[in-house]
């Protein structure tokens, strides 16, 4: 009788279930027993603190209580973060469910940052795409004018506008 094979899951698996063990391993190497502190930092600390500081490491004492959380921040933001440390410690301890963190230390970095953590904490704002040229839009409408289905015509019109805009940009670079 052949050995019974393990049945595999069908369909897609959530990314969290695939990456969970790796994230936990990396977090525990830095002292983060609860990876939620890293993954949900903006929710725990609040948007103001999360924009200028992030957790780097947690150092535990021998007893396991009274750990020290180290935050990375830029020099100008350090006094602002320093004023909010008692409130931040309460929020972090609420994440753990007990008073795990007794101290929070701040590490300041230059605008260029360390190799591990750059000083840029928030992503750059997204620039809205530039509106296509009116002649390109008119050409796209002329090309798709014979299509009777509204949704199909709109999709083909967007496609034609994108293709013609890209073609126009590449031609402009070669001249």
Image: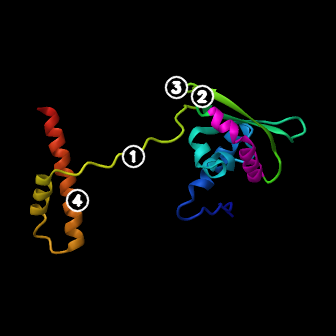
Q: Residues within 10 Å of mark 3 (few under 14, many from 20)?
A: few
Look at 71% across and 45% down and name the residue there. 88
Query: Looking at the rendering, which quadrant does residue 167 occupy?
Result: top left
Mark 3 or 4: the one toward you: 3
The magenta-colored residue range is 78-96
Look at 86% across and 41% down and name the residue there. 64
Determine which residue is flagged by label 3.
Answer: 112
Q: Can you give x and y, in whole percent of width and height, for residue 110 in the image? A: 56, 24
* Placement of 130 over or under 10, stated as above or below: above
Q: Can you give x and y, in whole percent of width and height, for residue 145 in the image? A: 11, 67
Residue 158: image tag: 4
Closer to the chain start, of discs 4 and 2, is 2
Q: Residues within 10 Å of mark 1 (few under 14, many from 20)?
A: few
CA–CA distance between discs 1 and 4?
21 Å
Closer to the chain start, of discs 2 and 3, is 2
Look at 10% across and 57% down and name the residue there. 139
Mark 1 or 4: the one toward you: 1
Q: Is residue 27 left or right of residue 143?
A: right
Closer to the chain start, of discs 1 and 4, is 1
Q: Residues within 10 Å of mark 4 (few under 14, many from 20)?
A: some
Q: Can you give x and y, in whole percent of width and height, for residue 170 in the image? A: 18, 39
Determine which residue is flagged by label 1.
Answer: 126
Q: As rendered, which of 7 and 44 lies closer to the eye?
A: 44
Mark 2 or 1: the one toward you: 2
């Amino acid at each position: 009788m052949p050995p019974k094979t393990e049945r595999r899951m069908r369909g897609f698996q959530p990314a969290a279930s695939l990456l969970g063990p790796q994230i936990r391993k990396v977090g525990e190497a830095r002292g983060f027993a609860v990876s939620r502190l890293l993954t949900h930092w903006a929710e725990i600390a609040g948007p103001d603190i999360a924009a200028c500081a992030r957790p780097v490491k947690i150092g535990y004492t021998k007893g396991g209580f009274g750990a020290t959380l180290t935050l990375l921040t830029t020099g100008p933001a350090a006094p602002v973060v320093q004023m909010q440390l008692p409130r931040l410690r309460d929020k972090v301890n609420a994440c753990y469910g007990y008073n795990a963190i007794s101290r929070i230390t701040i590490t300041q970095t230059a605008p260029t940052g360390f190799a591990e953590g750059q000083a840029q904490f928030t992503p750059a704002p997204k620039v809205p795409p530039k509106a296509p040229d009116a002649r390109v839009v008119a050409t796209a409408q002329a090309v798709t004018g014979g299509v009777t289905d509204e949704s199909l015509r709109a999709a083909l019109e967007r496609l034609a506008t994108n293709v013609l805009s890209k073609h126009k940009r590449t031609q402009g670079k070669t001249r």
